[in-house]
Amino acid sequence: MTAILERRESESLWGRFCNWITSTENRLYIGWFGVLMIPTLLTATSVFIIAFIAAPPVDIDGIREPVSGSLLYGNNIISGAIIPTSAAIGLHFYPIWEAASVDEWLYNGGPYELIVLHFLLGVACYMG
């Protein structure tokens, strides 16, 4: 029995990743836009589901009168909602790291902004 050894050129991990992402031989073509689209849409979807079920009330008007929209706060499937960002924030970018605490971010409607911005970025990547 004879074994033939063939010397393969060593390719870097990054090179193999690039070839795999851009290969049309895969069952599902991902591409470079897919590298950004898949995580952003998964983030938007998972935050939407979690917020729809368990988000705390949001101060939508900025007058310290929170409005609840999640299922755990007494809403049903029809009346449940993701409450928009507080009017006190305005149209400003409000990421998690800008808030003093996660509770403050949730109280001011941070999940709504996270969902919308991740969804818009994911759709833009889908359009290519």
Image: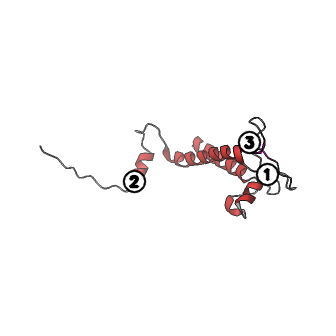
Up-down: is 15 above or below 71? Answer: below
73 drawn magenta: yes
Whether the residues at callouts 3 and 1 have beta carbons within 8 Å, the answer is: no
| Residue at the disc numbered 2 | 15
Left or right of 105 in this view: 27: left
Given residues 18 and 58, the one toward you in this image is 58
| Residue at the disc numbered 3 | 71
Magenta residue span: 67-74
Task: Give the amino acid at mark 3.
Answer: Leu
Which residue is found at the position 50% from the left and 48% from the top?
32
| Residue at the disc numbered 1 | 58
Q: Residues within 10 Å of mark 1 (few under 14, many from 20)?
A: many
- What colouring style does the render use? secondary structure
Q: Position of residue 70 (x, y in %)?
A: 74, 44
52 drawn magenta: no
Which residue is found at the position 39% from the left and 55% from the top?
13
Asked whether the viewer can see residue 64, the reply is: yes
